[in-house]
Image: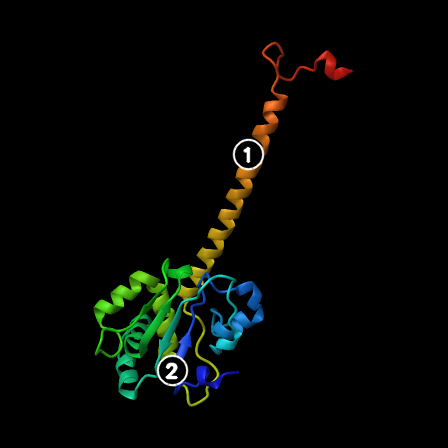
């Protein structure tokens, strides 16, 4: 296990739970070990964000965010905000040092850095990044940035995934199911149509009537 990746005093290379480039099936139980799980207080599971557990689909490039640890004054500024979402976004604005955006999530591969000479993300840069990856991605990565600030050196857990991340994964799975059903439906329709051309009765035959040839 790479402690450089999970040590909250180091820069973290952070993946998204709903990145299409990740091989969730291939990761098996490691998916939950890495990302955690959404649920109530009893069923939620903390993820360890250990990069060695990540598996990527062949030929696809995942999106990776780079997060530095929050300073105490930054953590205090986050704590003063009224909602979890606002704390996550503020934490991301402070902690963000760069991102490698993969085409599987964003459509294009590119390197995304803060404005030259700036620290973290200003409002304009946050909006631009949100246009690339979506607000749910900002929430999930921001939640990691915020929650790792609660840990001592070499802490193992971060936090359960935000509900927004779970909803995105559910939507993606449903879209995959709908797509497969549509493909299956199209295949069956084509098969029926090709068969109907063979068995279509001639105009002289009445529907439902058995012909003499069929009796023999």
Residue 63 is at least partly visible in this image: yes
Answer few, some or many: residues within 10 Å of disc 1's Cα (few below 14, many 20 plus, some between 14 and 19): few
Tag 2–tag 1 contact (CB < 8 Å): no
- Indicate whether 113 appears above or below 195: below
Which residue, given by chain and number where applicable, does mark 2 sit on?
11
Picture coordinates of residue 203 (x, y %)?
58, 11
Taking depth in this image into account, of 80 and 215 the one nearest to the observer is 215
- Residue 148: which quarter of the image? bottom left
Residue plotted at (52% across, 62% down):
58
Taking depth in this image into account, of 140 and 121 the one nearest to the observer is 121
Taking depth in this image into account, of 80 and 6 the one nearest to the observer is 6
Residue 134 is at least partly visible in this image: no
- Mark 2 or mark 1: which is in front? 2
- Residue 83: which quarter of the image? bottom left
Which residue, given by chain and number where applicable, does mark 1 sit on?
189
Picture coordinates of residue 179 (x, y %)?
49, 47
What's the distance in space between the residues labelled 2 and 1, CA to CA?
Answer: 53 Å
Residue plotted at (76% across, 16% down):
215
Q: How is the image coloured?
A: rainbow
- Indicate whether 128 appears above or below 65: above
Picture coordinates of residue 177 (x, y %)?
51, 50
- Residue 6: which quarter of the image? bottom left
In the figure, is residue 43 to the left or right of 72?
Answer: right
**Which dot marks residue 116?**
none
- Indicate whether 131 appears above or below 51: above
Answer few, some or many: residues within 10 Å of disc 2's Cα (few below 14, many 20 plus, some between 14 and 19): some
Q: Say which element carries label 2.
A: loop
């Amino acid at each position: 296990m790479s402690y450089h990746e999970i040590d909250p005093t180091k820069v973290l290379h952070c993946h998204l739970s709903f990145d299409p480039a990740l091989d969730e099936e291939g990761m098996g139980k490691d998916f939950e070990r890495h990302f955690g799980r959404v649920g109530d207080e009893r069923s939620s599971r903390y993820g360890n964000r250990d990069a060695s557990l990540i598996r990527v689909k062949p030929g696809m490039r995942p999106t990776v965010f780079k997060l530095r640890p929050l300073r105490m004054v930054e953590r205090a500024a986050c704590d003063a905000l009224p909602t979890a979402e606002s704390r996550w976004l503020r934490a991301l604005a402070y902690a963000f040092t760069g991102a490698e955006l993969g085409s599987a999530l964003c459509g294009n591969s590119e390197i995304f850095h803060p404005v030259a000479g700036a620290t973290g993300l200003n409002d304009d840069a946050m909006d631009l990044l949100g246009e690339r990856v979506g607000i749910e991605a900002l929430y999930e990565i921001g939640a990691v940035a915020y929650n790792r600030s609660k840990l001592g050196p070499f802490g193992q857990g971060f936090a359960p995934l935000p509900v927004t991340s779970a909803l995105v994964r559910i939507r993606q799975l449903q879209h995959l199911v709908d797509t497969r059903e549509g493909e299956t439906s199209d295949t069956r329709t084509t098969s029926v149509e090709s068969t109907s051309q063979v068995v279509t009765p001639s105009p002289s035959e009445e529907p439902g009537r058995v012909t003499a040839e069929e009796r023999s």
